[in-house]
Amino acid sequence: MNTDIEKFDARSRRNLVGVHPDLVRVVERASEITAAPFVVIEGVRTAARQAELVKAGASQTLQGRHLHGFAVDLAATVGAEIRWDWPLYFKIADAMQRAADEEGVPIIWGGSWRKFKDGPHFELPRQTYPDPAP
């Protein structure tokens, strides 16, 4: 395996800074049990970054869970290459759900949404993890 892209390379660790510790635990555990290796491509976002993604059509809300560290985006890797093949994201989602169950942390997978399916996206539910008061 290429050491440039590992389950928790420096980029992944950096992208977990500021993410809620419960979600970090789930991501770390999922990286140990997944059938499809992944890297963390995005954790906490600025409001400006969120607005860019909405404008580009990559997000549908300015109130995304990334803003407060309640969401991560994971990218499947095959060797040193990031891949966007949907079957890989089902494997990652399975590992994330198993890890979440083990850790007792509820999660929502963007790939299970009815509209705007987002395979790389995992978030903590607002009901359990509300956004901070403004």
Image: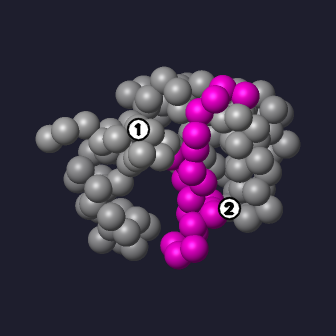
- Secondary structure category for the residue under label 1: loop
Q: Residues within 10 Å of mark 2 (few under 14, many from 20)?
A: few
Magenta-span inclusion, residue 5: no
Q: Position of residue 37 (x, y in %)?
A: 76, 41
Q: Seen in the image, is 82 located left or right of residue 35?
A: left
The disc placed on residue 84 is 2
Q: Nearer the viewer, residue 89 or 65?
A: 65
- Secondary structure category for the residue under label 2: loop
Q: Quadrant of the N terminus?
A: top right
All told, the count of numbered labels is 2
Q: Position of residue 25 (x, y in %)?
A: 60, 25
Q: Quadrant of the C terminus?
A: top left
Depth check, mark 2 against mark 1: the one in front is 1
Q: Which residue is mark 1?
A: 129
Image quadrant where residue 24 sits: top right
Q: Which residue is pictured at 57% across the width and 74% down the height?
A: 114
Asked if residue 5 shows in the view, the reply is: no
From which residue to which does the magenta span run?
Answer: 102-123
The disc placed on residue 39 is none
- Name, please, the residue furthest toward the left: 134
Sequence-first disc among 2 and 1: 2
Magenta-span inclusion, residue 115: yes
Q: Which residue is pictured at 52% across the width and 27% down the height?
A: 22
Q: Are marks 2 and 1 in contact (CB under 8 Å)?
A: no
In the displayed structure, 28 sits above or below 68; it is above
The type of residue carrying mark 1 is Tyr
The type of residue carrying mark 2 is Trp
- Name, please, the residue furthest toward the front: 127
Q: Position of residue 32 (x, y in %)?
A: 77, 28
Q: Nearer the viewer, residue 20 or 38?
A: 20
Q: Which residue is pictured at 25% across the width and 37% down the height?
A: 132
